Image (cartoon, rainbow, N blue to C red):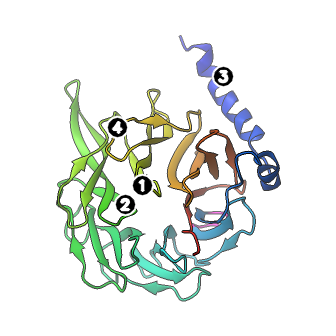
Amino acid sequence: MPSIQHFLRPIVGILLLIQSCKPSTELSANNEANGVPRGVLAFLTTRDGNFEVYTMNADGREVNNLTQNKALDFWSSWSPDGKYILFYSNRDGNNEIYRMDADGSNPTNLSNHPANDYLPAWSPDGKTIAFTSNRDSDNREIYIMAIDGSNVRRLTHNDLFEEVPTWSPNGKQIVFTRQLEEMVDTVKTTNGELFVMDIDGKNEKRLTFREGYDSGGKFSPNGKKIAFYGQDSSKNFEIFTMNADGTDVVNLTNDILEDYSPDWSPDGKWIAYTSGTSKQYDVWVIHLKSLKKFRLTTEPKRNETPVWRPDQK
């Protein structure tokens, strides 16, 4: 017979969503002791009917649609100087990697390939782009290319697939997700785990050994930690942090909502992430010291995958 917690769980989730709908002014007023998150976030939203790349201030204000295209525009990665954004789009008939100016102007197709290219990530020195593609196999693999789309090199060779490559702050390593098939109690299961490798594809190391799908790994600005999303013991997706070698895994969000796609603030004090349910996803931020959470978006229906613009020096 289901427990009372089974029936209370969805009710508590609804109450939490209602209570957390705080305007951005409340974020500023109530968080003086911890400092207010500063800077600009790129994020994805379907508020205009299809996925578009938007920006907003880190307090939820000054929201702008950058892509304004009827096709799917997805993902975002800032150039180190904050002047450009990478994303992928199917506006040319298949998924291609594009670069645009930070205000959304001058979109340029960089990959120009008949296969599907996804999930671009700009290297810290601004010279290289890591991405995922199925151009050489039916499975997605990790590639790198120059910022003009030339000199494409394949880094991984796997029977299943890899995704979400991101760079270490020193530009020497790439953390990524690999799909694995493993036997659990004599049953074959598909799992996702985080790996790290050198930028030539060598010295692969598995970082996570957990049940459920782990993905979205991002190094902290000082390179000592990695944030990612994965499942807790109740199969709910949460945001976790761990040391860069995979030790000391900590559940950061620890709530009943589904939490995905973490990204560190440039000062390393905050993590922006996606949180909600299938009915409503929003962009949130969490302060790493106090663990206080603030919701930045309320527009229906999907607001997700926030990425902080690098500090403007």
**Image-based side of 282 in relation to 160, left or right:** right
- Which of the 4 quarters of the picture holds residue 146? bottom left
Q: Amino acid at mark 2?
A: Ser
Circles 2 and 1, Cβ within 8 Å, touching? The answer is: yes
Say which of 20 and 12 sits in front: 20
Say which of 300 and 289 sits in front: 289
Distance from disc 1 to disc 4, alpha carbons, whole Å, reads 14 Å
**x and y percent of residue 274 in the render?**
57, 50
**What segment carries the magenta color?**
46-51
Residue 112's label in the rendered image is none
Say which of 22 and 73 sits in front: 22
Q: Amino acid at mark 1?
A: Phe
**x and y percent of residue 311 in the render?**
57, 69
Distance from disc 3 to disc 4, alpha carbons, whole Å, reads 34 Å
Q: Residues within 10 Å of mark 3 (few under 14, many from 20)?
A: few
Circles 3 and 2, Cβ within 8 Å, touching? The answer is: no
Q: Amino acid at mark 4?
A: Thr
- Which residue bears the numbered disc 2? 168
The residue positioned 57% from the left and 58% from the top of the image is 267
Q: Earlier in the sequence, mark 3 or mark 2?
A: 3
- Which of the 4 quarters of the picture holds residue 197? bottom left
**x and y percent of residue 265 in the render?**
57, 58
**Image-based side of 91 in relation to 284, left or right:** left
Q: Residues within 10 Å of mark 2 (few under 14, many from 20)?
A: many
- Which residue bears the numbered disc 4? 247
The residue positioned 68% from the left and 66% from the top of the image is 56
- Which residue bears the numbered disc 3? 8
Circles 3 and 4, Cβ within 8 Å, touching? The answer is: no
- Considering only vertical position in the picture, is 282 above or below 231? below
User: Disc 1 on helix, strand or loop?
Assistant: strand
Q: Amino acid at mark 3?
A: Leu
